[in-house]
Image (cartoon, coloured by chain):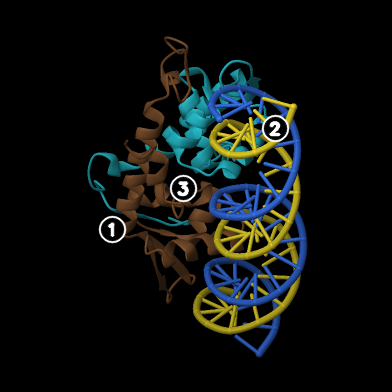
Chain colours: A cyan, B brown, C yellow, D blue
Amino acid sequence: MTPHPIHDINDDVHQRVRLGILASLSGLAKADVRHLKTTLDVTDGNLGRHLQALEEAGLVAQSKTTGNGRPRTWVKITAKGQRALRDEIRALQRLLGEVGALSGQPETARELSLDT
Amino acid sequence: MTPHPIHDINDDVHQRVRLGILASLSGLAKADVRHLKTTLDVTDGNLGRHLQALEEAGLVAQSKTTGNGRPRTWVKITAKGQRALRDEIRALQRLLGEVGALSGQPETARELSLDT
DNA sequence: CGAAACAACTCTGCTTTACAGAGTATCCGA
DNA sequence: TCGGATACTCTGTAAAGCAGAGTTGTTTCG
């Protein structure tokens, strides 16, 4: 029996804020932490914690610039992060593929038990 | 500014096992608890806890049959549950819509900061 | 050079959650 | 009536989210 798609879901990725971060980063070379904070509307410490977790998982990388202008922290998604995000999307697509509700109502209302 | 799609994500729904339950139920009239347990491969108590949470949120409803055959608990998704699942899918689609990685690589590698 | 402003990290405490495992009640068939 | 199965409940543990305060370092302005 094929394992259910929910087991392909990566807990490091599958979380509101984390998904938001990765999705935001996925099309960019890099983004300013301030930018993430305002677009995702999360608190300072909270964002920092998530970025730390993502970095520990190797999904994003941070770099700092200082000099002219303000001190700034840049975040970029890593190749591993891109892969993880893509896998997450695939898993969700497979998981939600069984949802007929996308287009309409349940075509034939079946019932399912173990010993049918 | 438009609020980011991550805020449309419902924490009652957006969770590995919960998502699996709702997706499994969405096309069915009702399903046996045993069936959910084996397909999702979760422990007894864990599944019970999730079903309880979903029921408290009004997203699923349970009913019991007894009589001939084994005692059996049936779970069905409610209209509210269908709606919540559909909203979740929509939110994910919007969230992941910005991911160019679906088809290919980032077209133009931009960088984004607050004051550009 | 010193003070204020700002960015970003860290730390702390609170609350919620997941999860496994043990125990328990109910109901069936033999 | 006993054994087995189903499913619920309870408990303890570990992890996670989150907000807010405090800290450090940097830039800009007087």
Residue B7, quarter of the rendered image: top left
Which amino acid, by three-letter code, is at mark 1?
A: Ala
Which amino acid, by three-letter code, is at mark 3?
A: His
Q: Residue at x 51, y 31 (%)?
A: A34
Front in this rendered view, residue A68 or A44? A68
Counting other residues with Cα less than 10 Å from the Cα at mark 2, is it few (<14), some (14-19), or many (20 or more)? few
Which amino acid, by three-letter code, is at mark 2?
A: Glu
Q: Which residue is mark 1?
A: B79
Instruction: Measure how far apart labels 3 and 2 are at the Cα level.
Output: 23 Å
| Circle on res. B14 | 3
In this view of the protein, can residue A2 be seen by the observer? no
Residue A99, quarter of the rendered image: top left
Q: Is A15 situated left or right of A63 in this image?
A: left
Q: Which residue is mark 2?
A: A56
Image quadrant holding the C terminus of chain B, namely: top left
| Contact between labelled residues 2 and 3, with CB atoms less than 8 Å apart | no
Label 2 residue SS: helix
Position of residue B75 measured from the top left corner of the image (x, y, whole percent):
41, 62
